[in-house]
Image (cartoon, rainbow, N blue to C red):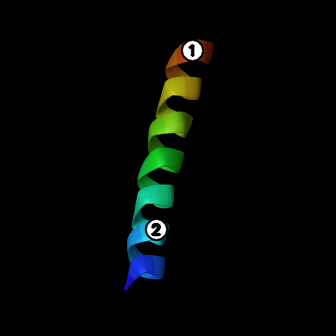
Amino acid sequence: MVNRDFGRMAISVHICFVTYWCIYLC
């Protein structure tokens, strides 16, 4: 259960980071 929650948080942070990186480049 903890592992699943950690996985969800990691995916959320990854998407946020990718979006920020794209905006920074654009």
Residue extending farthest to the right is 25
Q: Indicate which disc, 1 or 2, sits on the residue closer to the N terminus.
A: 2
Other residues around mark 2 within 10 Å, as few (<14) / some (14–19) / many (≥20): few
Point 48% across, 70% down: residue: 7
- Is 17 placed above or below 25 here? below
Tell me whether circle 1 and circle 2 mark residues in contact (CB < 8 Å).
no
Is 14 positioned to the left or the right of 9 in the image?
A: right
Image quadrant holding the C terminus, namely top right
SS class of the residue under badge 2? Answer: helix
Q: In this figure, which residue is indicated by the disc labeled 1?
A: 24
- Is 25 placed above or below 15 here? above
Q: Amino acid at mark 2?
A: Phe
Residue extending farthest to the bottom is 1
Q: Which mark is residue 6?
A: 2
SS class of the residue under badge 1? Answer: helix
Give the mark count.
Answer: 2
- Is 8 placed above or below 10 here? below
